[in-house]
Amino acid sequence: MEYRELEMSTPNGELGKSAQSAAGKTSKTPNQGQKGRLATHGRLEQIIVAVVIVVAMAALPSLHIGYRFLSIAITTGYTAIALYGLGLQFGQAGIMSVGHAAMIGIGAYVAAMLFVHFGVGFWVALPASIIVAAIAGGLVGLPSLRVAGQHYIIITFCFCALLVVCLTNGGSLTGAATGLDVGSIGSVFGINFDKLANYYYLVLVALALSLAIFYAIANSSYGRTLRAIRENEQLARAIGVNIDLQKISVFMVSGAFAGAAGILQAYYLRHISPTLYGAFPSLYLALMVMLGGARLIYGPLIGAIIVNFLPEVMNLNPVDSRIAYGVALLIVILLLPGGVSAGLLDIYRWLTARSRALFGKAGLAP
Amino acid sequence: MAALEITGLRKAFGGVVALDGVDLSIPGDKITGVIGPNGSGKTTLFNVITGVFPPTSGRIEWQGEDITGMRSHQIARKGLIRTFQQAMSFPGLTVLENVRVAMERGERRGAGAGPRWPSAEAILDFVGLAGRGQEEAGSMPFGNLRRLGVAVALAANPVLLLLDEPAAGLSDNEANTLTELIIKLPQMGIGVCLIDHHMTFMTALCTRLVVLDFGTKIADGAPAGVLKDPKVTEVYLGGEL
């Protein structure tokens, strides 16, 4: 997976380059060739990594980690779902958004409003949230056909602010500044989702699904077309790619992920209010996706884990943690333009190259 | 029969008239060259044909269909594929992926007049980039980037290929290889229309030359005749010698 030429990297891309060449001679082996794809190492290794992650995450509740830790794990889970959408939009199509919390908000509010005003429960509201958020994503994406780069990023930010204003002034429809109360999912097939561990599993299943969709898209011809648009719009148009259609489609996909995240958040918190979807949460989403790395399969997940767990593990208060994120983001942009996930992959490649050099080619060949 | 029929094409950017009533027909089975001094409207001609911007007035017909004012990707899907003056690629993708993106578009359109390439690798072979499929396009030297540009355009399954200064910046040796490549295209069912300044390159390739000056066509015909035309020598050499 190529990440070096990440849009954010500009003058410091060189640093990333030297970091990669330091990553060893692997960059010359034919196996390395699948740049731009997610599959850089062997299929077996990928499966092992995926199994380890799934087992570790599934085992979490049975480790008696406590209510608080599990709560953060759930938050991390649904945030990561939204990040996988943003990861496709930013990593594949190259269009960043700093108003993505608004999309989550739309998903959450659709679910909450359906519950409060029509008594509609989780399972019916789920597709509604996804569809409405997807449509909203497409609409917010429309200006991107006219304006690019930073200008579009500002528009996403404005949209997010606009949504908060609308929700706050929505009267009884949106519950105004107080927000809305949401019911519980209750029991389905004997599984009681009021139990925290069970809700965690629900989020985990949704997360696994998002991961799979992310992987499938990034490795499909659709993903390749998106990357082509990211790399050179003019050329893509000249070979017959309908840029507008493709861009709107990825905004819709990204919105759909956020919609799913939104309803999971609403039914987890049981109460939502406009402040959850304002500027700060949006910036955090952008921060997470850049920290973790948008182009690699585990990037968004790593970003979500770091940002959600770091203050807890290091016992930081909100002010200190914001400073820490700021510093972390600077470091990542300067030294690891592909995010932490790309950095880890570099280390992994360096280690395998090293072990191959030490133990001979037969040693640890993938 | 002319594949591309242009009548009274005019393009003005504010007060600057880049194309001033050009009539031109380009056949789909030959190599047609467009020459002219800098600023004579050659690239604008390509841009208007391929829908980068709409003409101010005039009509463009492609295989009997009016394509005036259509959008770039729609025109590309009809088999009119262009390359760019600056060697362009998808720099972050591999060479093979570059070709595959284009090939998918070509295949989706169905059979064109051109050859059906068995694989993306076959196209790379054809343009002389065999074995370089796994390289990152952005890290290739300039000459190879030009070849890749042609490979991507060919992969998009063109009926008529519009090449905008394909030899610009190439060494004589590289230009010769490119000549050998382009000259094969009409036999494969791909019409070529190319812009270039490189005269030896153009005369070696083209069966017909069109000369533009200040947005108007001043000569059109076989290369030998056109280059002797006093209007053409005046434009290039500044009048009687």
Image (cartoon, rainbow, N blue to C red):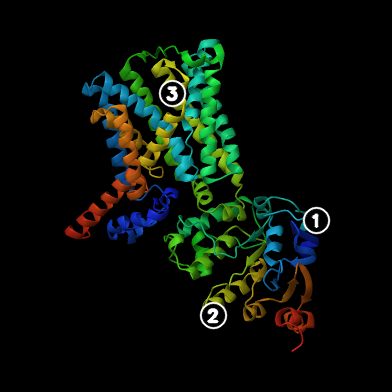
The answer to whether residue B28 is visible is: yes
Quadrant in which residue B217 is drawn: bottom right
Question: Mark 3 sits on what residue?
Answer: A276
Above or below: residue B61 compared with residue B130 = above
SS under mark 3: helix
Q: CA distance from mark 1 to mark 2?
A: 39 Å
Q: How far from the left and from the top, in percent, is residue A215? A: 42, 41
Q: CA distance from mark 1 to mark 3?
A: 53 Å
Q: Dot 1, crowdedness within 10 Å: few (<14), some or many (≥20)?
A: some
1 and 3 marks on the same chain? no
Task: Give residue B57's mark.
Answer: 1
The answer to whether residue B63 is visible is: no
Q: Earlier in the sequence, mark 1 or mark 2?
A: 1
Q: Nearer the viewer, mark 1 or mark 2?
A: 1
Mark 3 belongs to which subunit?
Answer: A
Mark 1 belongs to which subunit?
Answer: B
Q: Residue at 34%, 55% (x, y): give it.
A: A15
Question: Mark 2 sits on what residue?
Answer: B172
Residues at circles 1 and 2 in contact by the CB criterion of under 8 Å:
no
- Amino acid at circle 2: Asp
SS under mark 1: strand
- Amino acid at circle 1: Ser
Mark 2 belongs to which subunit?
Answer: B
Q: CA distance from mark 2 to mark 3?
A: 64 Å
In the drawing, does residue B105 fall left or right of residue A92? right
1 and 2 marks on the same chain? yes
- Amino acid at circle 3: Leu
Quadrant in which residue B59 is drawn: bottom right
Q: Residue at 73%, 75% (x, y): give it.
A: B208
Residue placed farthest to the bottom in the image?
B241
